[in-house]
Structures are given as structure tokens and as C-alpha cells.
Amino acid sequence: MNAKTGEVYANIRGDEQTPSASVMKVFTAAAALETMSTQYTATTRVFTIPSQPGVIVLRGGGDHTLTRLNSPRYTTYKKPARLSTLAAQVLAALPADQQITKIILDDTYFDKPFWNKAWKTSDRTNGYISLITSLQVDSDRANPDLTSTAYSGTRSKDPVLAAGTHFKKALGLRATSAKLETSITPDDAILAGSVQSQPMSVWLDHALKYSDNTETEMIARHALRINAMTTTFENIQPLMVRVLKTLGIDSKKLVMTDGSGLAQSNRVTARMVATLMAKATDPTSVLNPMIGYLPVSGISGTLATRFNGSNKSARGFVHAKSGFIPGLYSLAGVVYAKDGTAISFAGFARTAEKKTVGYGARNALDTLADRLYECGAGSYF
């Protein structure tokens, strides 16, 4: 459709419900942009407990980017808060000869469950997503070090305990014998230090450009908290319905089981997605920053290596979110066509009716976007 006028150029089963794959991430991003400040940050805190000498608390605030690495090692996240900073702060707050005997790990910032029953166990063990706990380090990757040949994106069964183990190591010799305990922060705890994440704008940019599932689910959780809603998977859809109503978009066919698009049970329509993307092209809309966060054809993110060969003419002119789950490929965003027209679009290739889509569907979706670039508002085929 013409993103400015709303004129529909083509509608092929555009009102049919389809699984979304990672195109769903634009909905989560829209919820965040509509209801939160792009300068919002997540805070991780450490506490001492005067009534319990030797006991400290590490309390999560939903910062998946919090890292155990220090320079020159680095992760996929830009300028993350560091465990080493928190360790130095809490050690400085304790008497110099005080040994740490117990570390309380408080992950109560988000509500349970932390795992979506619609996800496969292999989504975690293959590294696609972690449990969505409010306390975790490096998105719970087994080895997040991008300078290491042993890099591993595999996630654990207990991100909170893993975070505690890394924090204990960061505390050094004074915490050698410390026990780890998952609990709540005692009432008499005294704040000893804190670190803040990068702002929400940085999270949104990374989540959309690199299709980070954990990051997108974290964004959904923070949006729910900001909107005074229990931070459960079940509440993501009610929040999104409210946001779409505000934006004037029909949400009747939306099924949003998660925020990242991993769940096979998610449902959207192409019209719904294309309409949302059209809204984002308006420079006066709160959604407008999303256009800059999206991968760009042949330039950045998940589209950096795409739009080659016969599709290369559209390189640099397609801002779109790609997606894949077994049985479905998707691509949706905005094409800035050769004639200057901004065209919002959504394309889905789905295994159905005894027909199976394969890897070639990805290139076919790129071809769709490339033809929109060539055609613009006219008909030049």
C-alpha cells in the first residue's frame, strides 16, 4: 500500500491469518514506542544488609545486556553495564576485612512463568532464546565473547543461578565461600550500588536489526510494567490490542502468544502489518524511529547479505523485518521506491495445502520488495 495515502496496490490473501515469525517484533517495538520513553533504562542493584554481615543482594531489573566481560572482550550488545562495576561498588560498601558468606539473587522484577509453553526446548538449547528472567547476564549465553573462537549462544536452564555464579567470580577472593540463594531483598537492605543499561532506543535498534528474541521479550516485559500490567506472556496481546486501537488499526485477527514471534501459534494478517508499517513512515508519529531501527536491504542487520543478483537494485531502499520459523518465511516493512513513493508491505510464504516452502522463499520475498522498488506508484512490469 502507499504508505502516505493508504491506497492498496495489491492484496493477495492480505486478510488471511498467518503465523508471523520475527515480523511480530515490529508489534512489540510499536508497543514500546507508543507507551514508553526511548530513553528508558533498566537498572541492576546491589545491596548490603546491616543485620546480616557478610550477606549481600544482587537484584535484577530486567537488563539482559548486563555483562561479565571486560575490555577487550565484548558481546553483541553495545556498551553494556558490567558485573565488575557492581562487584566493586558492593565491596567498597563493606568493611575491608568483611568476607561475603551469602549472595541473595532477587529476580522478582518480572512475574512467572519465565518460559513460554509455546516454545520448544530446542529454542533454548539451540541458543534462540533464554528464559525471560529479570536477572541474567549476557542474555544467558554460555560464552558471549565475540572475540572468542569458543563463542556459544547456548542458554541454560537457570539464568539467575548462572548470573549469581558470574557475580561471585567478579567479587573475587572475599566471596570464595559465598553461598548463592534465590530469594527476595530483605526489608532492611541498604543500596550499595547500581548500574544502568543502554536506553530503550539502543535495545529496539539491536532487537529489530539482529532479530534478538530474548531482547524483544525483555522489551515486552518492560512495556507491561510501564503500563501497570502483570508481566506475563498472556498480557502481551491485551497490551498490543490497546496500542493498535490507539493507532487506529484493526486487531481482531491478531493472536500474540509472545513478543518475539517464535511461537507457531502467533497470527497476524498482511494488511495489519502493512498498515502498522505505513503509520511508522509518518515523521510526526511516535512509531517513526522504527524505520531507522529496521534492517536495510544489503546494508545492515539480517538483510546485510541479501538483495543480491537480480534484486540488487533495491539495495539500501528497503527497511524491513525478516522472519523465519519452520514452515514460514516473512518480510515486512517499507520500500522507498525509485519514483519516490514510500510503499509499506508485508509478505508471507507459508507451508500449507500440501505445498512446502523452502529456503528459496526468502529470495522470492526479496524479489517482491525489489519489484515494489522498481514499480513505485506506477505499473511498469
Image (spheres, grey):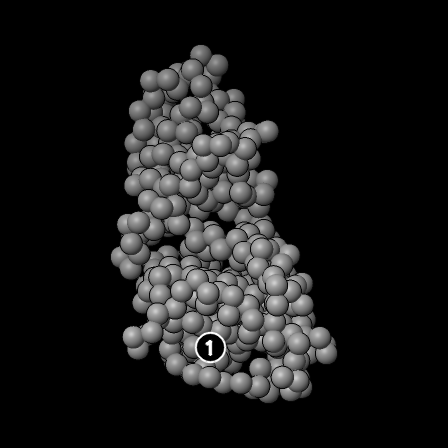
Q: Residue at x 57, y 59 (%)?
A: 306
**Frontmost residue, 378 versus 38:** 378
Question: What residue does disc 1 label?
Answer: 270
**Frontmost residue, 326 versus 92:** 326
Q: Locate the N terminus and report the quarter of the image it occupies.
A: bottom right
The kind of residue tagged 1 is: Ala
| Residue 269 appears left or right of 263 | right
Which of the 4 image quadrants contains residue 22? bottom left
Q: Residue at x 52, y 22 (%)?
A: 92
Q: Is 332 drawn above or below residue 136 in the view shown?
A: below
Q: Is 200 drawn above or below residue 183 in the view shown?
A: below
| Residue 270 appears left or right of 79 | left
Q: Residue at x 51, y 80 (%)?
A: 248
Which of the 4 image quadrants contains residue 348? bottom left
Q: Residue at x 49, y 39 (%)?
A: 66
State the image coordinates of residue 222 (x, y, percent, origin top left). 46, 55
**Frontmost residue, 206 versus 305:** 305
Q: Locate the C terminus and report the quarter of the image it occupies.
A: bottom right
